[in-house]
Image: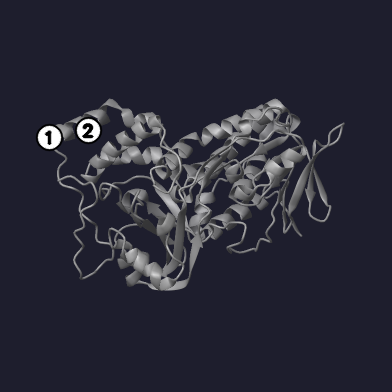
C-alpha cells in the first residue's frame, strides 16, 4: 500500500467556508478521473480527503487495469475542459505542455449517417491518451491542501458508525479501516456498493441498462499530424454498419479505433483488424493506417453498456454517502461523455458541500438527484443512439425518436454545407447548449427552405492524407439526397 499526501502547494480551488457545515474527513473510493475530480471539489483547509485506489499507480502516464478503456481514444468534450478548468485552474495548459493535441472539432473529417460534415470552426478540445489525462489530473489533485492518495488498497466494505464519532468506516483488505464523515463512491463500473448497501439493510436501487454489445479495437499509429489533412477522422457507426475513429495524441502518434456491434465487433488479430477498416463504407481510416507505421498490439474493449443506478430513488438513503462517475451512471464510451459528466458531477458536489450538509440523508440524496439530472441529456443521447442498433434490446422512447428525427433533419442540412445547423448540433453534443436550442425558429425556417428549394450539393469527401496521389473515393453516403 502506497500513501501519498498533498503538500498544500496546489493552485486548485477549495470549498471555502464549507468546513463548518460539511465533513472533516472524506474518503473517496476510486482514484480514476471521477474520484480525483471529486477530491478536487471537496479539498478545503481543515478537511482531509483520502482517495483510495485499488491499483498501484505509477508516477508516469501508464495504462492500468482499473481503467479498462484506457487504451482507447479520449478527446475531452469542450464542456469537460471548462468544468475541469474550473476545478483545477490551468489544467488545459498543463495537458498541452504534457503533449495534449489541440483539435478543433469542426475540422474533423466526419462521415455521419447522411454524409460528410462541413468544415466550420467549432469547439477547441484536447486529444490525449487516457493515461496522460489521468496523470495530469492526478498530479494536480495530489498538490491540493489536505488531499492524500492511498494506492494498492482494495476496499472490502462499509460500516456505519456514529454516536459521536465518524459516520462511516471504510474497510480495506487486511482489516485496515479509514474513518469518514463522508464517503464518495467513484469506483466505476465494478462498484461493489450494491453489495455493501445490501449488507447494511438499504433497499436495492433500480438499474437501467441499454447494451448494444458494441466492441472497440484500437491500435497505435505513428504518423505526423501535419501529414493528415483533417484534425481527425470519424466514420460514424450506423444501425447496420460498423465504423471507426482516428485521433492524434501526444508523441506524434494516433489512436485508430474500429467499432462494431454484436457479430460485427472488430477483431484482435492485426491483419483482420486492418481488413475490417478496409471494409468500412469509406476507406478513410484504412488510408490513414497505410500512410503511417503501426505499433503494438490491437487492444480490444467491450465493456460498453449504458448502465444507470437510480440511487436517487432509494428510500432511506443514508447520510454521508454519495456516488459519482460510472458507479452512478456509465455511458457507451464512443460518445465521449463520461469524463464530462464526471466533471459536472464534481462541480455539483463542490456546490452541495458549500450549501448543504452532505452528512445528512437529505443533503446526500439531494446531491444524488442533481447528479442524475446532470447526466440526463448525455444518457438520452447515448441510449437513444444505441437503441437504434439491432443488437440492443428495447425500443427508442417516442420522445427520443421524435427528437432524433429532427436532429437528423439538421444533420442533413449540415451534410449539404449548412454550417449554422451543424454548429447548433455540435453545441448540444458538447453540452454547451440546451437541447431546446435546436428548435429555434431560425433553424426550423432553414429546414423548410431546404425542403422547398432543395438542399444544394453535398459536402465533398475530404482528402485524408496530404499529398496522396490516389484520387479521393467517390463513395455516396447512405441516405444522401441529390
Badge 2: residue crowd in 10 Å (few <14, some 14–19, many ≥20): some
Q: What residue lies at 20% left-to-right and 44% top-to-bottom?
A: 416
**Residue 326: image location, x then y, percent:** 58, 45
Is 28 drawn above or below residue 265 in the view shown?
above
Mark number displayed over residue 453: 1
Badge 1: residue crowd in 10 Å (few <14, some 14–19, many ≥20): few
Q: Which quadrant of the structure image shows residue 384?
A: top left
Mark number displayed over residue 176: none
Q: Report which residue position mark 2 lands on.
A: 447
The local secondary structure at tag 2 comes to: helix
Q: What residue lies at 54% left-to-right and 58% top-to-bottom?
A: 70
Q: Is residue 95 left or right of residue 112?
A: right
**Residue 472: image location, x then y, percent:** 21, 63
Q: Earlier in the sequence, mark 1 or mark 2?
A: 2
The local secondary structure at tag 1 comes to: helix
Mark pair 1, 2: CA separation: 10 Å
Q: What residue lies at 36% left-to-right and 56% top-to-bottom?
A: 243
Q: Residue furthest left?
A: 453
* Color theme of the render: one colour
Is 359 drawn above or below residue 63 in the view shown?
above
Q: 269 or 233: nearer the eye?
A: 269
In this view of the protein, can residue 129 be seen by the observer?
A: yes
Is 388 drawn above or below residue 222 in the view shown?
above
Quadrant location of the N terminus in the rendered image: bottom right
**Residue 201: image location, x then y, percent:** 76, 35
Look at the numbered discs 1 and 2 and tell me whether their residues touch, using CB distance below 8 Å: no
Q: Is residue 289 left or right of residue 27?
A: left
Amino acid at each position: 500500500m502506497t500513501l501519498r499526501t498533498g503538500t498544500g502547494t496546489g493552485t486548485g480551488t477549495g470549498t471555502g467556508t464549507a468546513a463548518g457545515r460539511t465533513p472533516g474527513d472524506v474518503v473517496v473510493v476510486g482514484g480514476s478521473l471521477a474520484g480525483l475530480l471529486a477530491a478536487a471539489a471537496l479539498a478545503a483547509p481543515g478537511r482531509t480527503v483520502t482517495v483510495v485506489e485499488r491499483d498501484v499507480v505509477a508516477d508516469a502516464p501508464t495504462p492500468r487495469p482499473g481503467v479498462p478503456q484506457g487504451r482507447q481514444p479520449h478527446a475531452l468534450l469542450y464542456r469537460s475542459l471548462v468544468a475541469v478548468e474550473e476545478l483545477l485552474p490551468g489544467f488545459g495548459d498543463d495537458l498541452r505542455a504534457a503533449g495534449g493535441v489541440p483539435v478543433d472539432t469542426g475540422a474533423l473529417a466526419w462521415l455521419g449517417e447522411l454524409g460528410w460534415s462541413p468544415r466550420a470552426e467549432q469547439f477547441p478540445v484536447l486529444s490525449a491518451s487516457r493515461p496522460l489525462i489521468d496523470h495530469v489530473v492526478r498530479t494536480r489533485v495530489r498538490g491540493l491542501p489536505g488531499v492524500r492518495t492511498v494506492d494498492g488498497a482494495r476496499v472490502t466494505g462499509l460500516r456505519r458508525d456514529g454516536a459521536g464519532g465518524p459516520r462511516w468506516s471504510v474497510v480495506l483488505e487486511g482489516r485496515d479501516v479509514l474513518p469518514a464523515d463522508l464517503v464518495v463512491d467513484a469506483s466505476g463500473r465494478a462498484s461493489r456498493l450494491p453489495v455493501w448497501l445490501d449488507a447494511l439493510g438499504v433497499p436495492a436501487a433500480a438499474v437501467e441498462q441499454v447494451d448494444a454489445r458494441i466492441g472497440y479495437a484500437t491500435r497505435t499509429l505513428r504518423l505526423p499530424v501535419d501529414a493528415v489533412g483533417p484534425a481527425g477522422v470519424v466514420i460514424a457507426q450506423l444501425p447496420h454498419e460498423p465504423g471507426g475513429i482516428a485521433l492524434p495524441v501526444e508523441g506524434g502518434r494516433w489512436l485508430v479505433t474500429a467499432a462494431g456491434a454484436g457479430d460485427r465487433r472488430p477483431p484482435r488479430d492485426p491483419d483482420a483488424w486492418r481488413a475490417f477498416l478496409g471494409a468500412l463504407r469509406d476507406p478513410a481510416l484504412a488510408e490513414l493506417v497505410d500512410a503511417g507505421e503501426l505499433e503494438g498490439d490491437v487492444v480490444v474493449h467491450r465493456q460498453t453498456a449504458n448502465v444507470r443506478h437510480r440511487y436517487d430513488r432509494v428510500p432511506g438513503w443514508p447520510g454521508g454517502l454519495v456516488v459519482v462517475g460510472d458507479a452512478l451512471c456509465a455511458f457507451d464510451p464512443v460518445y465521449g461523455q463520461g469524463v464530462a459528466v464526471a466533471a459536472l458531477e464534481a462541480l455539483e458536489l463542490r456546490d452541495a458541500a458549500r450549501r448543504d450538509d452532505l452528512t445528512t440523508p437529505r443533503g446526500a440524496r439531494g446531491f444524488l438527484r442533481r447528479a442524475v439530472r446532470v447526466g440526463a441529456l448525455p444518457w438520452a443521447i447515448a441510449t437513444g443512439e444505441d437503441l437504434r442498433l439491432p443488437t440492443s434490446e428495447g425500443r427508442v422512447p417516442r420522445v427520443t425518436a421524435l427528437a432524433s428525427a429532427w436532429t437528423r433533419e439538421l444533420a442533413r442540412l449540415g451534410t449539404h454545407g449548412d454550417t449554422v445547423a451543424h454548429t447548433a448540433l455540435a453545441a448540444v453534443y458538447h453540452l454547451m447548449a440546451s437541447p431546446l436550442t435546436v428548435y429555434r425558429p431560425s433553424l426550423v425556417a432553414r429546414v423548410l427552405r431546404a425542403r422547398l428549394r432543395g438542399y444544394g450539393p453535398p459536402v465533398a469527401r475530404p482528402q485524408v492524407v496530404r499529398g496522396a496521389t490516389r484520387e479521393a473515393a467517390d463513395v455516396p453516403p447512405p441516405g444522401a439526397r441529390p
